[in-house]
Image (cartoon, rainbow, N blue to C red):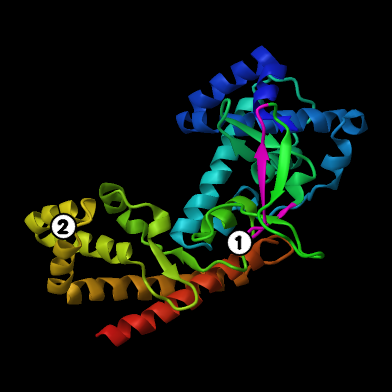
Amino acid sequence: VISSEKAYQEFGNEIQQAEQVLVQIDQGTAARLPLFRLMVKILAEYDQGENSAFFPWLNSLPRVYYNGVSMTNDCFSCLPPYAGWLASTEKANYDSFVTALRQGYVQLQSVNDDTVTQWAYNVALTRFQEVWSPQRAKLIAPMADMLNHSAEPNCEITFDDMGNCEVTAMYDIQPGTPLTISYGDPTNPTPIFAQFGFLPADCATLFCKAMHLEPYIKELGIEFKDLLIQTETGEIAPKVWDLFLYEILVNNDPGAAEQYYVAVKCNDEATKQQYQDQYFQYTLDSMKQHVYSILSDVDTLTAKAQNYDLSTHPRVPVIVAHNNLVRDTFTMTAALLEQMG
């Protein structure tokens, strides 16, 4: 098992100095130091070639990835704001990691090879499992990392206090059935898209794409995973309505906004319903404007992506697939909103 904590111990003062540089570059990377340690370990094992005990595993791994780290600015410009933000954030994190490593504190032969460093980052990013006891660490168990994703997994991966990996069936699995785990929150496929470079085939919901309302999202304490639209029906989650109504009240009636804020925080459904009834047409119009704006934008973004040469932009198909999912879902949402008035 490759462990971020063991890597930290193995590289000692070298990695400590590199981490100090990393945090100076971007304080936000402090929360991602376990991932940095995994990347360092993978690069060190890669440098050993066939002499590494992990060579057979490393040699079996994909060399091409389609996630945010592997995308270019052209790719980001073809994604809706939320997906583009997640993907570009991952790329920026990778850039910070590489900048810190190239200061030379950790002796790595391949550190100046962009292809190898990006590959090592992607191996760490897409294959780790996180544990929180006895201390927070990221672990990779070769072979166990080969299990694919499902929104309804049939296996789970755990580690004991000694760091041993256990793969446990969650129920009786029929012969010939693929073994699967969950790669992330199945209600919101976009983070999985940004991290792993694919769209789950069984995703039932996606984020409402209201990134322009992020300040109000934070103010209300709503998580992105609660601001969802059903991919099969286009139905809108109640908290999305809360968010759009709150924006209207803040901009037009601060007193009412304060009362609605309290109602949302206290789960006062009666008060919320009163305001929703009173301002329904305004909220509906705002929602329609948002949905049609997304539909217009996503068609433009998709057309832009399709103009790129696949030989130089091999990630276009997964970008188009993501945009098509957004378009198809929001088309259903638009039809539902029109039925409301």
Q: Is residue 149 magenta?
A: yes
Instruction: Name which residue lies at 27% across and 52% down.
Output: 216
* Label annotation for residue 74: none
Q: Position of residue 131 (x, y in %)?
A: 59, 35
* Number of residues whose C-alpha sits closer than 10 Å to that of mark 1, classed few (under 14), some (14–19) or many (20 or more): few
Q: Position of residue 204 (x, y in %)?
A: 51, 69
Residue at disc 2, secondary structure: helix
Answer left or right for 241 relative to 130.
Answer: left
Q: Residue furthest left?
A: 255
Instruction: Name which residue lies at 60% across and 70% down.
Output: 321
* Number of residues whose C-alpha sits closer than 10 Å to that of mark 2, classed few (under 14), some (14–19) or many (20 or more): many
Q: Residue beneath label 2, please?
A: 260
Rendered position, 54 above or below 263: above
Rendered position, 116 above or below 221: above
Answer left or right for 256 relative to 93.
Answer: left
Q: Residue beneath label 1, please?
A: 152
Tell me which segment is drawn in magenta: 147-161
Residue at disc 1, secondary structure: loop
Q: Is residue 200 magenta?
A: no
Q: Amino acid at mark 1?
A: Glu
Q: Amino acid at mark 2?
A: Tyr
Front in this rendered view, residue 37 or 140: 140
Q: Position of residue 25 (x, y in %)?
A: 51, 28
